[in-house]
Image (cartoon, helix red, strand yellow):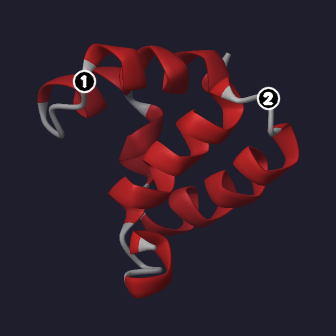
Amino acid sequence: QLIRQYPQFPDVRAALTAALWAEGKRGEAQSNWVAVIGLDQRYQDLDWVSNIRRWPPLMVEALREFLS
């Protein structure tokens, strides 16, 4: 629902990417990631995601899995 309400909010899209990847929905995750990178390339930096955006460790790990 948040993604429909705020389609230009990269934090939500990046979190959705990580969650979709963890669920095995590879194609959907990759599609969302294209939007994330178009909005804010800093989401490729896991240190930034963890320490600046303050994501929970489980979500950071899911994003790490997606990026690797």
Q: Which mark is residue 23?
A: none
Left or right, 40 with reference to 24 = left
Q: Position of residue 5 (x, y in %)?
A: 40, 85
Q: At 86% across and 47% down in the image, what residue appears?
A: 27
Q: At 38% across and 16% down in the image, what residue appears?
A: 58
Crowding at mark 2 (Cα within 10 Å: few <14, some 14-19, many 20+): few
The residue singled out by tag 2 in the image is 24
Q: How many marks?
A: 2
Residue 10 sits in quarter: bottom left
Q: At 37% across and 45% down in the image, what residue appears?
A: 42
Q: Position of residue 51 (x, y in %)?
A: 14, 25
Work out how far the residue at label 1 is from the one at label 2, CA to CA, in angstroms.
20 Å
Q: In the rendered view of the protein, which quadrant contains the C terminus? A: top right
The residue singled out by tag 1 in the image is 56
Left or right, 60 with reference to 7 = left
Left or right, 52 with reference to 3 = left
Location of residue 16 with respect to 23 vertically, above or below: below
Q: Residue furthest right?
A: 27
Q: Secondary structure at mark 2?
A: loop
Q: Secondary structure at mark 1?
A: loop
Disc with the residue nearer the chain's start (1 vs 2) = 2
Residue type pointed to by label 1: Pro
Location of residue 66 with respect to 68 vertically, above or below: below
Q: Position of residue 66 (x, y in %)?
A: 65, 26
Left or right, 44 with reference to 57 = right
Residue 49 sits in quarter: top left
Residue 52 sits in quarter: top left
Q: Could you say which is closer to the camera, residue 1 or residue 9?
A: 1
Residue type pointed to by label 2: Gly
Crowding at mark 1 (Cα within 10 Å: few <14, some 14-19, many 20+): few
